[in-house]
Amino acid sequence: MMTAWRGDHGNIMKVGDICSSLVISVPRSAFVADAAALMKRHQVGALLVTADDGASGVGIVTDRDLVLHALAVSASPGSVAVEQVMSREPACVSREADLRQALAVMREGAFRRLGVKDAAGNIVGLLSLDDVMQVIASDLVSVANLLATAREREHASAMALASGT
């Protein structure tokens, strides 16, 4: 059984096991309105920001960045470039990093999302707190089911003893 800390084979779960491999990108010169439209279209909360030639990731922009750094200061989403509100050089972890390492990076930097890199250093995924919470929630459901089963067995055993069987 896969848990938040152990993968299918009992090894510590790797970031690559749970991260989203859907990485939508936006050029850094695009406007905030374009980024918001991409997020809505793909139902994501973060975009990889690329150099204008699309060749490399230069940052990350989140829905929170759009609100706090553009909309909340009354800037027009059609006149503010993504590069003005993005986080430069986003925190990243290897796809092979274990979940505990990724959570430590998130905690230390107060990040809600991390870029996930392959062995060549390319960003190939994003790990969000939502991804982590889905795994933990699944584990909690498993624990609750285990407790319910144990409780049912104990009740059945007590009833059998009470009836003398």
Image (cartoon, rainbow, N blue to C red):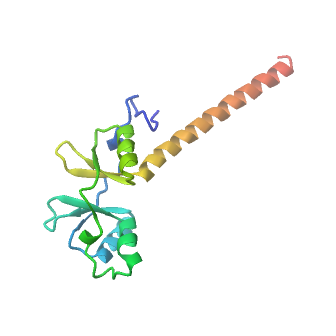
Looking at the rendering, which quadrant does residue 153 occupy? top right
Q: Is residue 64 left or right of residue 150?
A: left
Q: Residue at x 52, y 39 (%)?
A: 139
Q: Which quadrant of the structure image shows residue 151?
A: top right
Task: Tell me if 20 is positioned left or right of 143 in this view.
Answer: left
* Front residue of 148 and 99: 99
Image position, residue 101 (x, y; %): 35, 39
Q: Residue at x 38, y 42 (%)?
A: 104
Please state if 109 lies on the left or on the right of 29 as rendered: right
Give the residue at the far right of this rendering: 163
Placement of 109 over or under 142, stated as above or below: below
Residue 128 sits above or below residue 11 on the image:
below
Q: Quadrant of the C terminus?
A: top right
User: Which of the pair 45/69 is nearer the observer?
Assistant: 69
Left or right: 63 as drawn, with respect to 80: right
Q: Residue at point 61% right, 37% down?
A: 145
Residue 39 rendering spot, x and y as whole percentages: 35, 67
Rendering quarter of residue 60:
bottom left
- Which residue is nearer to you in this view: 105 or 21? 105
Residue sitting at x 56%, y 37%: 142
Query: How many tags in the picture?
Result: 0
Residue 5: percent from left, percent from top: 43, 35
Image location of residue 42, percent across then percent down: 35, 65
